[in-house]
Amino acid sequence: MRLLSKAKSKPNSVNTPFPADALPKAVADICKEISNSFEVPLELPCTTALGLLAACCQKKAIVRYNATYTEQINLFTLAISDTGDRKSNVFKLLRDAVISAQNEYFTMNEDRIAQSRLEYNLLKKRLDAASRDMIYNEGESTYTLEDIKDLEKQVRDFELLTAPKLLVDDATSEKLIDVLEEQGGSIAIASPEGGLFSTLKTAASANPTFDAYLKAYTGDSIEVARISRKGNSIEAPKLSLIIACQPKTAMEMIKNKTFRDKGLPARFLFANCRSLVGKRTFDKPEVSAGAIESYNVLIRTLLDGVFDRNSKETELTLTAESRAAYIEFSQGIEAKLDDNGEYKFMQDWCAKLPGQMLRIAGVLALCDGKAQIDIDAMQRAAAITSWFTESAAVVFNDEISDVGKLTGEFSALLLTRFLEECTFYSKGEYVKTADLLRCYEVWAEKHGYETPNPRRFVTALRGVLTVKKISDGNVARDIAIKN
């Protein structure tokens, strides 16, 4: 049996240091100090900070490339880091500035928010009372149908002020939609754990509202009709995801067929962080107050006016020089996507790369206080995007640290990798599990992995495929072997 899937040459690690100096100076300075003080790889705070900057900016502007093409500037970032790499400490320090600004706005507007809630509740009670009066006092009610319609319209059109939120830790698809609408269509999820992917896995298999995560990345409108309560209508939603997780969690997300088919991994900027565990000295200076204050000032500046529901986004256009640099970068990526191209194996991810660069350039321009993306912002965005491209090549080639530690023992992860490389899904196809086992043996021998006994193989196979017992053995349904 011939296997069409060939092993690709795989880079062992990201050799190029993260271009921290391409970030705004206040961000570069604090990320370098965090890296030194916490003894973590520089790419961990830099990736986290970039995602948080996008979250702060996403409601302020869009990038206008031409009359028909725009990009939002929200980002999905994923720092892949081993256990014990102090992800939570990094997140807390960088996230605290955003939460502090969020709380300051709430404190300043607490009375207005409470008054708005009171007026809304009173209006709803008037509507309820009028409706009951009309029902129970038919013919003698002091309210007319037009009165009821007018009150119902007032409730529907009431602009309720809510406690401002820019960051949440996690959210189901339904909760995300509600929070997006409550916050004027803009929210970010920032978490040093990968629990969100478990939530999304359940949603993707059972609930169409999973698409809200995908639509909120691209800005496609979300319309949800509900039977028991008011539906949701969100125009141009904006969601940033800033996640850090362990390699195994990241690999499960990337290898999930539903996620891959829907384009979730393709939306993430991956940072495959080098672990420093085992090399730390525990004798480093703390992050300086000056670096923290400069970073906090930048965050507060970016968030100025963001919590105002009536704030209007601006359009960032490109200078002639920055447009030329964008075209050159995009064409360079495109040339590596043909059948023999260097990045063919991650074509889905690279397809979004030019747009990712525009988004990063937009964030940098806003941080610099500019109304246009100039050549400096575009070149810095290109440096950052190039680094993420090198990191993505490592990630999509399965060279995440936990995977590299596999000893060759048969595992569910190896089975998933085998199915991805050596089979394809074809509705209605049936393949004998004995044939699948022989195919696995050829593949495993090629890679130096252990071959399991047939019973163990079929047991593991049942965990990922529909396996049916027939008179002369077992068959796997809706799958075919590449040959």
Image (cartoon, rainbow, N blue to C red):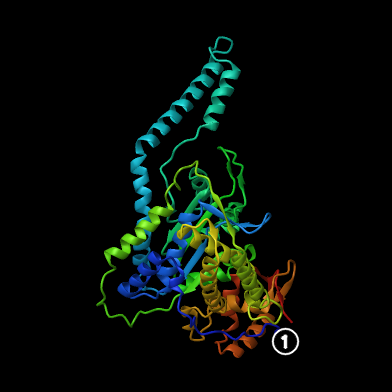
The front one of 42 and 415 is: 42
Please name the amino acid that badge 1 sits on: Arg
Residue 257 appears in the rendering? no
Q: Is residue 220 above or below residue 399?
A: above
Q: Position of residue 181 (x, y in %)?
A: 52, 44
Left or right, 15 with reference to 352: left
Q: Residue at x 58, y 75 (%)?
A: 416
The front one of 287 and 393 is: 287
Q: Position of residue 21 (x, y in %)?
A: 43, 72
Q: Which residue is mark 1?
A: 2
The front one of 322 and 163 is: 322
Q: Position of residue 16 (x, y in %)?
A: 48, 81
Q: Residue furthest top?
A: 140
Left or right, 49 with reference to 412: left
- Quadrant containing the N terminus is bottom right
- Quadrant containing the C terminus is bottom right
Left or right, 442 with reference to 87: right
The front one of 363 and 212 is: 363
- Mark 1 neighbour class, 10 Å CA radius: few under 14, some 14 to 19, many 20 or more: few
Residue 183 appears in the rendering? yes
Q: Residue at x 75, y 67 (%)?
A: 428
Q: Is residue 225 above or below residue 439?
A: above
Q: Secondary structure at mark 1?
A: loop
Number of residue marks: 1
Residue 295 figure quarter: bottom left
Q: Residue at x 62, y 72 (%)?
A: 329
Q: Position of residue 401 (x, y in %)?
A: 46, 80
Q: Residue at x 34, y 41 (%)?
A: 108
